[in-house]
Image (cartoon, rainbow, N blue to C red):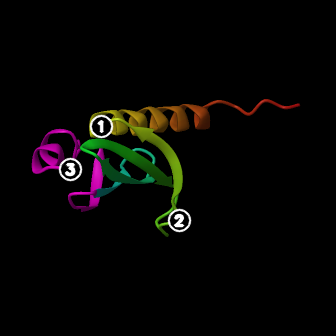
Amino acid sequence: MFTNKDFEELIDKNYFVIISQNSYEIELQSKNTKHFWSLLNREYNNISSIVVYSSHYSDGDYHLHCHAINLEQAILFIKNNDRFYLESKERPMALG
């Protein structure tokens, strides 16, 4: 379950726009790439994991991106994905 402490301490409001949040789901938009992210907290027998979905558009058509062991790792995955995406846009495409 996500807590208020998670929302306050782990989600960088300078990096993300928080679209919605509750105890089991957080929807974010990266200010860097404008991509959308849905983080679902799944719990079973007191074991929690985060399922991370992403979308390049605001229509909510998300696809599975990865699984994380906690919110901190999920945020790190997103930031690393943003970095990769932005760096790949700067590189010229190889021909051939």
Q: Which mark is residue 2?
A: 3
Q: Secondary structure at mark 3?
A: loop
Instruction: Give the residue number, with chain letter if any, for mark 1.
Output: 70
Task: Give the Cα distance between marks 2 and 1.
Answer: 24 Å
Q: Does 14 lie within the magenta span?
A: yes
Query: Which mark is nearer the camera, 2 or 1?
Result: 1
Amino acid at the residue labelled 2: Asp
Secondary structure, mark 2, is loop
Pick the residue in front: 53 or 80: 53
Could you say whether the residue bearing mark 1 is in a helix, strand or loop?
A: loop
Q: Residues within 10 Å of mark 3 (few under 14, many from 20)?
A: some
Per the image, the residue denoted by label 2 is: 61
The answer to if 71 sits in the magenta stretch is: no
Which residue is situated farthest in the bottom direction here? 59
Name the one closer to the observer, 26 or 69.
69
Q: Residue at x 54, y 31 (%)?
A: 87
Circle 1 packing at 10 Å, graded few (<14), some (14-19), many (20+), is some
Label ID, residue 37: none
Which residue is found at the position 20% from the left and 39% from the top?
Answer: 10
Q: CA distance from mark 2 to mark 3?
A: 23 Å
Between discs 3 and 1, the one toward the N terminus: 3
Q: Amino acid at mark 1?
A: Asn
Residue stretch in magenta: 1-24
User: Residue 47: percent from the left, percent from the top?
Assistant: 28, 41
Q: Position of residue 11 (x, y in %)?
A: 23, 43
- Image vertical order of residue 56 relative to residue 33, above or below: below
Do tag 2 and tag 3 residues touch (Cβ < 8 Å)? no
* Residue depicted at 46% across the width and 66% down the height: 58
